[in-house]
Image: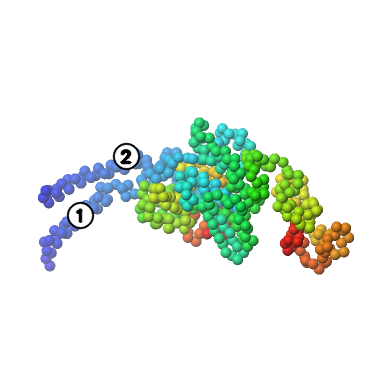
């Protein structure tokens, strides 16, 4: 079979084009033309060159050692300076630049310390409506070392909600220490020594057992042997408001 | 010009085109390909973050610091990191709320739901996956993983098609409304390469966030990994996240 002349010519042209493309791809153009590496390196360099806003605790400490020491001794020891004072890299590199902020508003402290049910147990929180409403926190608390100025003398200083609840209940006249044994250590570091709760039914039974001889014996008497089984009284009755919650 | 003349000129031009091969030989380009800077070797690091859920108090300081450090738009819809509040009710129903979108915490605390059995905060951010789905889908190769494990976006190449935003199983990317390119957490790449902590870790008041280097010896993150029960988000996707969560509730997605 004879191949037509025009097919041969077309074939030659195609072969030349293919050869040129292959030449361009593998011989003429450098490998970096196809590689993503130079673009990626340029991006990395661009990212690394971005300006730093937060200087870091180490930089603050160089000049403010006293504040750092005070903070390190207190319960705010793990908080970076710029958490409260704001991004301060400009101030760290040039003292004449604008000074970092000094937040003194109540709302600022409440960002962390207002009560929120989702916060972890044991994190110090206050009810903003009940804990010195309207007063600025810095009046009593030094933010670098935020222990309260002194231990309140009454239990209600810290346990106000419980004290107010109890004041409205039939247990209003009972002092807290009637039921709770409070260790001296609790007044200094509340969480290190928690007050006790009654661990026996006889404790409540002094007033509430039928046949009690106590002059202050309550009218609400039960037979300890048949009432409540194995449970301690406060597992069902809320002792700070006994008529309120079952 | 006839055909014969044209072809002769094309052929005579070919050696001249070989000049293109000169371009990677310039000193600057060579240096760029080997290492970004002289005093930082990315192959010696493999960065990660640890998040202790039990310590997060939901104060949003990390979100604010991140926005200040990385020029993230102030509108409360754009985040590189954000905090979610989980509430799990006794009937098994779980509600998730992003608390970072709030302007300010409400003055009057919300009434407590007695049916809530567990509630806690979970900080979220880009998980810097070892096998990032966002990198696979990018049609222009604008997003990539560096040798130290951080996933970055090349804003000059990104065409803003939002494929990566769809592909991210953790919802960690957003489209920057000013640059019209995808943006995400970089672990504060400009800070960590200079030995500083990411801004969110720097300001976290309860040390709920730990930053570290899996290749570092006696590193905080390695210790965090050893002493805690570690989970990652969506492990079934095999993305191998480098953000490790301690004490993570099974309900967290």
Q: Is residue A225 above or below residue A61?
A: below
Q: Residue at x 52, y 40 (%)?
A: A87
Query: What distance separates the C-alpha of mark 2 from that of mark 1?
Result: 31 Å
Seen as rendered, the residue at the extreme top is: A96
What element does badge 1 sit on?
A: helix
What element does badge 2 sit on?
A: loop
Chain letter for the residue marked with disc 1 in the picture: A
Query: Do callouts 2 and 1 point to residues on the same chain?
Result: no
Q: In the rendering, which numbered label is found on residue B26?
A: 2
Question: To which quarter of the image does residue B167 belong?
Answer: bottom left
- Residue B84: tell me if it is visible: yes
Q: Residue at x 49, y 53 (%)?
A: B127
Total labels drawn: 2
Residues packed near mark 2 inside 10 Å, few (<14), some (14 to 19) or many (20 plus): few
Task: Give the image's coloring scheme.
Answer: rainbow
Q: Is residue A44 above or below residue B248?
A: above
Q: Position of residue A45 (x, y in %)?
A: 41, 42
Location of mark 1 (residue): A17
């Amino acid at each position: 079979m004879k191949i037509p002349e025009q097919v041969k010519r077309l074939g030659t042209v195609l072969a030349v084009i293919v050869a040129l493309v292959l030449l361009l791809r593998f011989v003429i153009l450098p490998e970096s033309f196809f590689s993503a590496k130079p673009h990626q390196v340029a991006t990395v360099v661009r990212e690394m060159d971005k300006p730093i806003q937060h200087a870091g605790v180490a930089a603050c400490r160089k000049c403010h050692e006293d504040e750092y020491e005070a903070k390190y001794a207190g319960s705010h020891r793990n908080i970076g300076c710029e958490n409260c004072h704001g991004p301060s890299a400009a101030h760290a590199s040039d003292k004449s630049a604008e000074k970092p902020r000094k937040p003194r508003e109540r709302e600022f402290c409440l960002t962390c310390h207002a009560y929120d049910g989702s916060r972890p147990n044991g994190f110090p929180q206050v009810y903003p409506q009940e804990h010195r409403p309207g007063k600025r926190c810095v009046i009593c608390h030094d933010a670098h070392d935020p222990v309260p100025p002194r231990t309140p003398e009454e239990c209600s200083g810290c346990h106000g909600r419980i004290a107010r609840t109890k004041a409205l209940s039939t247990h209003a006249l009972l002092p807290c220490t009637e039921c709770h044994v409070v260790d001296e250590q609790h007044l200094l570091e509340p969480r290190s020594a928690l007050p006790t709760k009654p661990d026996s039914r006889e404790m409540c039974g002094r007033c509430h057992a039928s046949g009690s001889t106590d002059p202050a014996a309550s009218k609400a008497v039960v037979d300890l042997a048949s009432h409540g089984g194995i449970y301690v009284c406060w597992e069902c009755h809320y002792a700070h408001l006994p008529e309120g919650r079952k | 010009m006839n055909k014969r003349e044209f072809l002769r000129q094309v052929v005579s031009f070919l050696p001249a085109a070989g000049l293109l091969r000169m371009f990677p030989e310039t000193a600057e380009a060579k240096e760029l390909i080997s290492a970004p800077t002289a005093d930082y070797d990315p192959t010696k690091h493999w960065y990660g973050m640890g998040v202790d859920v039990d310590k997060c108090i939901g104060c949003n300081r990390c979100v604010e610091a991140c926005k200040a450090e990385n020029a993230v738009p102030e509108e409360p819809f754009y985040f590189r990191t954000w905090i979610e509040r989980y509430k799990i009710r006794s009937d098994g129903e779980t509600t998730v709320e992003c608390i970072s979108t709030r302007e300010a915490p409400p003055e009057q605390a919300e009434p407590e739901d007695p049916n809530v059995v567990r509630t806690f905060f979970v900080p979220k951010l880009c998980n810097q996956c070892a096998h990032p789905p966002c990198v696979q889908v990018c049609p222009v190769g604008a997003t990539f993983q560096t040798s130290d494990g951080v996933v970055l976006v090349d804003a000059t190449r990104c065409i803003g098609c939002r494929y990566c935003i769809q592909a991210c199983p953790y919802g960690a990317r957003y489209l920057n409304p000013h640059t019209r390119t995808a943006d995400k957490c970089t672990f504060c790449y400009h800070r960590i390469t200079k030995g500083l902590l990411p801004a969110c870790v720097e300001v976290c008041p309860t040390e709920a966030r730990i930053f570290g280097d899996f290749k570092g010896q006696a590193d905080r993150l390695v210790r965090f990994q050893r002493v805690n029960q570690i989970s990652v988000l969506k492990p079934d996707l095999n993305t191998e996240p480098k953000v490790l969560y301690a004490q993570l509730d099974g309900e967290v997605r």
